[in-house]
């Protein structure tokens, strides 16, 4: 095995996890990039983030020693990607963690053993930094490991101390690799901490040994923790002897594909190299984000993905790539990372489709941006203005993805200047806002929960029972734990065990009753807290409930059964959608309650009526097959090997529940289900439509609700048939005949209106007023629609080379305004949009449009005269 194969990122990853497995660590697959039950994070950006619940004590870890290779996305330094040797938006973080088990001695010794004995890094090229007051770590490095004191650098809090405002904190120790004096600054004092590129930080060991209080006092933790992080790509660059992380295998393979597409050679032009690196990084980040269920959108993590894809496409344009290319680089990512992340291969067609659609969409938006830019330039040509507004340039960049460099190039070609300083100022302002937003959400992933409940996890017995006895272990009122809740009061009751299902996985929580001798309480909802404690939202109807009471918990049986019917039906629907629409279909969300079901799925185009009817028919066929519904409890590997479908972005425990609908469907699911599909009764789709880019939603009903819905439809149909004096069979043809008759009459009315308009145009053309040299046509009309007003405005402009027009139509309960202005007046600053806004504002409405044409509406027709007077006043002021 040659050096590159020996030190490929796949092998380094295996070596790391196997090493820590030999040290008694539970090694886990990477968690999804989408945080679970953590609103403080947009995306997972650190190895510890998915394990936070174990560090805080909110949940008990499956092992006191764990090790992972975690997928991470950080966009805080996105502008440095491709410019430096080590910045990436997507990276893999190797980490080993101790939850109150081992501490500094073991963490330091094992880090050294892995780097020098396993990965064979030259010990003489390794340096370490420690917190300036951490004598303990310095002594371990020197006395136990044997690093000379001159290669142990003490640094201050900014560099070697990890802390939050309040909570866990502690010193850290970083391990650096010396790349050689030729890559340094030349100073004889050059060492870790210097700003030059000589020393690369490869591993950070955080010793969480304090609990910082609100006064800033550090209290020693009785069971300190270890949290380490080593960038896989950085280690690979060291082991492969590469100058940057982009030159390691297999990242360089992505760059080779960009070379092939662009016909540009890597390593010749620094600026073009940067573009290639950005495409490389963003292709990988987009692939993994889509693979974990992120969809391009204009908000949240979807906006992060969209921004990365569009940045990559813009860099492609700078390399001379004008055709769609990103699916080709994404395919390289899938091929090279599928060994470690097989789900990329499983979702390949879906990932490529999302990228293709986003690339096509971006092509449209960048064309829209070009159209907006040319309109702005056209308006500037009629003025003395020569410097292009930086705020408009930023809008082009931010909304349409229009590169500022391209804006500047077009401006220069047209004889205008670009206000770069204003553009940069606005850009920095938005970056600052983004940074503040990230800091508010706690980018470290350590944001506190709203409140805490001091109790053991709840045992759920609801798979087997709908009524059970339990002990009250906690009561919460207004986020404070109390001992008793009395008649008429509402609060949260926590039991040691419960048959009530807590809302999760899209299934609503159970309702029901709690009772004991002399006590009765209503449970309106049940939720899960930190995934393990069940919260019963309770109102006491009689007596009181106290901590320690023994009570009976009785689930609302009808609600549970109807919810179970809908839940099982989503599994059948999921399978039918895959059969009908393709394997790219995956569940993207669901909601099941006693009344209805909602199923969100990944698909890229509208589903036609006939296909929807066939989907409905197939689901009902499966229901009538009367499949037995069985649940098996398996370990995760057995479950996957059995062919069970897993949710798109879910991170599963080692032991999972597999729900099988006969031999028709098999899914991993923790929800409750019926035992036979025939009990669902029937399935009826109520609606289908898009809810986001690449995401569609089906809403449906089952059982009695579906029967009642169909009965209502029959009743409505009977009433319509009676009104139309026809039978159900002849109703469609009767309606179509009526539609045709109505359309013919509309055409006749339009024809008569046109004739009337033609006869009255001479009179209309005489009705104008000159204001400040502007010919204004201000007309009040009645019961005219927007098309009629526009037609009148066009006829006025046909007969007048220079004029402004404001037309109103009194529609009884509202008013419609249309404004039109000739091009010569546009150049003098008279704009239809401003005219129509002035009128609509008076009439209690709003609207707008282009400089040459605009329309608006208002709620107060009685104010039409005032509105027209406001337009005249606007022109007088001009």
Image (cartoon, rainbow, N blue to C red):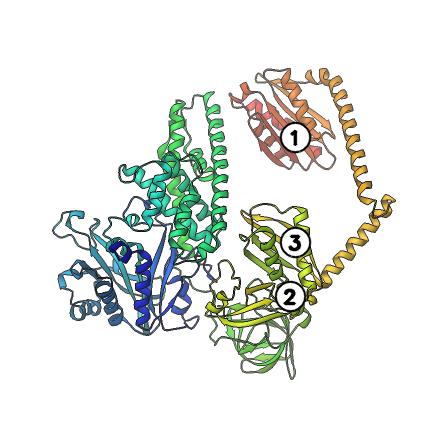
Residue lying farthest to the front in this orientation? 1
Label 2 vs label 1: CA separation?
51 Å
Residue drawn at (83%, 48%) of the image: 728
**Res. 553 visible in picture:** no
Identify whether 582 is placed above or below 872.
below
Which is nearer the N-term, disc 2 or disc 3? 2
What residue did someone put label 1 on? 817
Q: Residue 838: x and y, percent? A: 60, 31
Q: Residue 132: x and y, percent? A: 21, 63
SS for callout 2: helix
Residue 563 badge: 2
> Which of the 4 image quarters holds residue 135?
bottom left
Residue lying farthest to the right in this orientation? 725
Label 1 vs label 3: CA separation?
46 Å
Residue drawn at (51%, 62%) of the image: 646
Identify whether 461 is placed above or below 357.
below
SS for callout 3: helix
Which is nearer the N-term, disc 2 or disc 1? 2
Task: Left or right? Give the position of 684 relative to 72.
Answer: right
Residue 615 badge: 3
SS for callout 1: strand
Q: Residue 7: x and y, percent? A: 27, 57
For the residue pair 569 and 391, the one nearer the viewer reads as: 569
Q: Residue 566: x and y, percent? A: 64, 63
**Res. 57 visible in picture:** yes
């Amino acid at each position: 095995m040659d050096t590159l194969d020996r030190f490929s990122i796949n092998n380094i990853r295996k070596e790391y996890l196997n090493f820590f497995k030999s040290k008694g660590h539970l090694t886990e697959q990477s968690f999804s990039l989408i945080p679970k039950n953590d609103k403080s994070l947009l995306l997972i950006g650190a190895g510890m983030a998915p394990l936070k619940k174990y560090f805080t004590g909110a949940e008990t870890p499956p092992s006191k020693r764990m090790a992972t290779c975690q997928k991470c996305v950080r966009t805080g330094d996105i502008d440095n990607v491709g410019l430096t040797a080590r910045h990436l938006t997507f990276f893999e973080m190797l980490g080993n963690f101790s939850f109150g088990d081992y501490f500094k001695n073991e963490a330091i010794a094992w880090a050294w053993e892995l780097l020098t004995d396993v990965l064979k890094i030259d010990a003489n090229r390794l340096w370490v930094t420690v917190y300036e007051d951490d004598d303990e770590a310095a002594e371990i490095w020197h006395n136990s490991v044997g690093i000379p004191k001159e290669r142990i650098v003490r640094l201050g809090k900014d560099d070697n101390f990890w802390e939050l405002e309040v909570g866990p904190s502690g010193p850290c120790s970083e391990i650096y690799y010396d790349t050689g004096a030729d890559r340094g600054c030349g100073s004889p004092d050059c060492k870790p901490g210097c700003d030059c590129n000589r020393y690369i930080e490869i591993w950070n060991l955080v010793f969480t040994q304090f609990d910082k209080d609100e006064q800033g006092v550090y209290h020693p933790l009785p069971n300190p923790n270890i949290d380490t992080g080593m960038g896989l790509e950085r280690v690979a660059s060291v082991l492969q002897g590469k100058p940057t992380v982009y030159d390691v295998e297999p990242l360089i393979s992505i760059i080779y594909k960009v070379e092939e597409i662009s016909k540009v050679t890597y390593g010749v032009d620094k600026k073009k190299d940067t573009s290639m690196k950005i495409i490389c990084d963003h292709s990988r980040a987009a692939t993994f984000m889509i693979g974990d269920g992120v969809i391009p959108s204009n908000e949240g993590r979807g906006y992060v993905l969209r921004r990365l894809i569009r940045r990559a496409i813009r860099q492609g344009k700078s390399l001379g790539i004008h055709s769609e290319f990103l699916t080709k680089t994404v395919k390289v990512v899938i091929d090279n990372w599928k060994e470690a992340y097989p789900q990329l291969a499983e979702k390949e067609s879906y990932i490529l489709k999302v990228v293709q659609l986003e690339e096509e969409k971006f092509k449209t938006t960048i064309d829209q941006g070009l159209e907006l830019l040319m309109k702005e330039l056209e308006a500037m040509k009629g003025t003395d203005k020569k410097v292009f507004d930086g705020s408009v340039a930023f809008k082009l960049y931010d909304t349409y993805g229009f590169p500022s460099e391209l804006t500047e190039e077009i401006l220069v070609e047209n004889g205008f200047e670009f206000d770069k300083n204003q553009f940069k100022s606005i850009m920095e302002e938005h970056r600052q806002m983004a940074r503040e937003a990230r800091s508010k959400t706690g980018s470290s992933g350590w944001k506190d929960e709203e409140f805490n409940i001091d109790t053991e996890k709840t045992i759920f017995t609801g798979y087997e029972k709908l009524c059970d006895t339990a002990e009250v272990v906690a009561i919460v009122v207004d986020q404070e734990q109390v001992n008793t809740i009395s008649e008429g009061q509402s609060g949260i009751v926590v039991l040691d065990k419960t048959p009530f299902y807590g809302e999760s996985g899209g299934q609503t929580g159970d309702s029901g009753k709690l009772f004991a001798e002399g006590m009765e309480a209503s449970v309106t909802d049940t939720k899960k807290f930190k995934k393990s404690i069940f919260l019963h939202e309770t109102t006491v109807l009689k007596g009181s409930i106290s901590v320690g009471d023994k009570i009976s918990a009785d689930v609302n049986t009808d609600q549970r059964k109807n919810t179970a019917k809908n839940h099982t039906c989503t599994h059948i629907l999921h399978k039918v959608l895959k059969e009908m629409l393709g394997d790219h279909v995956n569940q993207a969300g669901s909601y099941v309650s006693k009344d209805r079901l909602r199923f969100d799925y990944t698909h890229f185009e509208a589903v036609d009526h006939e296909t929807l009817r066939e989907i409905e028919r197939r689901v009902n066929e499966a229901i009538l097959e009367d499949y037995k519904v069985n649940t098996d409890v398996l370990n995760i590997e057995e479950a996957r090997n059995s062919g069970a479908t897993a949710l798109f972005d879910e991170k599963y425990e080692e032991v999972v529940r597999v729900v099988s609908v006969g031999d028709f469907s098999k899914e991993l699911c923790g929800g409750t289900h019926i035992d036979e599909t025939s009990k669902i009764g029937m399935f009826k789709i109520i609606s289908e439509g898009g809810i986001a880019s690449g995401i569609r939603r089906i809403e449906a009903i089952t059982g009695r609700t579906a029967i009642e819905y169909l009965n209502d439809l029959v009743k409505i149909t009977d009433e319509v048939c009676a009104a139309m004096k026809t039978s159900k069979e002849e109703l469609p043809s009767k309606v179509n005949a009526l539609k045709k008759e109505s359309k013919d009459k509309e055409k006749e009315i339009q024809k008569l209106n046109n004739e009337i308009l033609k006869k009255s145009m001479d009179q209309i053309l005489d009705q104008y007023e000159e204001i400040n040299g502007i010919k204004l046509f201000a007309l009040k009309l009645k019961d005219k629609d927007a098309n009629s007003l526009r037609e009148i405005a066009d006829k006025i402009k046909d007969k007048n080379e220079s004029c402004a027009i404001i037309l109103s139509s009194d529609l009884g309960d509202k008013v419609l305004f249309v404004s039109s202005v000739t091009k010569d007046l546009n150049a003098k600053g008279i704009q239809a949009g401003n005219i129509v806004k002035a009128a609509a504002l008076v009439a209690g409405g709003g609207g707008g449009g282009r400089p040459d044409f605009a329309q608006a509406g208002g709620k107060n027709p009685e104010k039409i005269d005032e509105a027209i007077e406001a337009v005249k006043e606007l022109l007088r002021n001009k």
